[in-house]
Amino acid sequence: MLPNLSPASADALRTALQRVGYTTDGVRELLGPGAHSALARDEVVPALRAAAGPDDLAVLVRLLLLGTTEPDAAVTAVLAPLTPAAAAEAGLLRRDGDGWRAALDLRPYGDDSDGTEKAEWWVLSDLDLRRQDRDHVTGVGAASLTLAAATVRRPVGTLLDLGTGCGVQALHAGRHAARVTGTDLAPRALALARSTFALNGLDVELLEGPWLEPVAGRRFDQIVSNPPFVPGPPRIDYVYRDSGQGGDDALGALIRDLPGHLEPGGVAQLLGSWLHVEGEDWPDRVRSWLPDGVDAWILQREVADPALHVGTWQRDAGLDLASPTAREQAGGWLDWLERERVEGIGFGLITLRRTGGAPTVVFEDMAGAVDDPLGLEAQGWLDRVEWLRAHAADEALLGARLAVGPQVVLERYAEPGTGDDIGWTEVGAAVARLDGPRWRHEIDEPAVALLAGCRGDLALGELVELLSFAHDRPADELVAATLPAVREFVRHGLLVPVP
């Protein structure tokens, strides 16, 4: 039976959740920081101990988050005005002896990353005990959070959430898009998304079908997608992760097709994985998928060797890696990767923009954690690329006024002296950002002097003239050496244009 939370049941359930205080802050306060962190690691016992009391919020946390069976009387009281029978009819609960257990995962989820008032939602998804089912619908997982944090949040008219799953990206989209459309191949995913939107009082258009077929002929201001991107043999073990096409073929086809569904200037962002094949450069592989007329920022966050890749996704599916089934699956998967000469599997974020100008295509590696949401960086990258396009001519760039970014520092480093020299010998310098992705560039002394002069007062060309005089170097020589680096500094936000 597919979940089906009617409008009336959704209103009643929302009333109960609000009355009890079943919110992100409420649950965190009840559990305390230690148990709350343990629950995020799937360690349930500390949370069970913290939520052992008889109050309504504790009952609801045990019932909906911790998988316990709660007595009929307690469930009736805590869910009122929704009856347990109505909750069971909607697919949320199931009978367990004289009590009730959760049949779905229903958890609070919040977002305040954009600096405005915190948004609070409730998300319905499948329980982890169903994780090995082919049509399992995941909840708010690491991939969903990664994409949500990396998404550009400017106001737009229309937004498409391609492969919406339980609807996490569409929830975020409702904060900055006037009209949101979600698509999915899986009827179960759409049923859970529909119930999630009903519970949160949101109007989202939902369409069933594979990939972009449900929106054929339509264009959007923005597209976000957490597609089934896991490279492997051409089969579908789990709908949420497997495309049915071999390797990264499905991702390549999607990247080719997405720009045709964007309005001019429209932006698409998606997660993806691509193969590192023996004898090939991975940027060349991904570049071959890009159609004309598209700015592209391909940010590789990590690279896994084949064994780690297979083991990671088997654990994600809840498999016992020592079981015969898991061993057989892993063997077939690794055999396929070996036949395809795969040396590694890259994972990252893809940002595309439909443009009428000369496209900018950039590939970058950014390993390690990023403290700040990447959405602001993606938004800044798009703005800076557009500015650089307007200042593509050397004369235009030389006429611009630039300033060092507010979170940029100069680093100098030295090595211990040798022999009789007991001091330190300076060997280099770098300029770096302290926010966002912490971009860092090695620079020489003329570049140090140039950046020191970038305060927004003088045009870049005037600064180069002064630098030419100070270092007794021809101005043309400095221009040729300086402008490529300046463009990189601007693109990484180390230098910012001054109006």
Image (cartoon, rainbow, N blue to C red):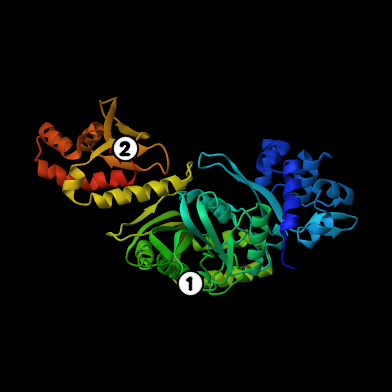
Label of residue 144 in the image: none
Label whose residue precedes the other's in the sequence (2 or 1): 1
Q: Which residue is mark 1?
A: 216
In terms of secondary structure, where does tag 1 sit? loop
* Relative image position of residue 367 (x, y in whole percent): 44, 49
- Residue 282 appears in the picture as rendered: yes
Q: Nearer the viewer, residue 231 or 184?
A: 184
Asked if 464 appears above or below 264 in the picture, the reply is: above
Give me the C-alpha separation between circle 2 and circle 1: 47 Å
Residue at the image point whose x is 63% and y is 65% from the top: 190
127 sits left or right of 230 in the view: right
Q: Nearer the viewer, residue 308 or 203?
A: 203
- Identify the image quadrant of residue 433: top left
Q: Which residue is mark 2?
A: 431
Q: Are marks 2 and 1 in contact (CB under 8 Å)?
A: no
* Relative image position of residue 134 (x, y in whole percent): 65, 69
Sort mark 1 into few (<14), some (14-19) or many (20+) by Cα contacts within 10 Å: few
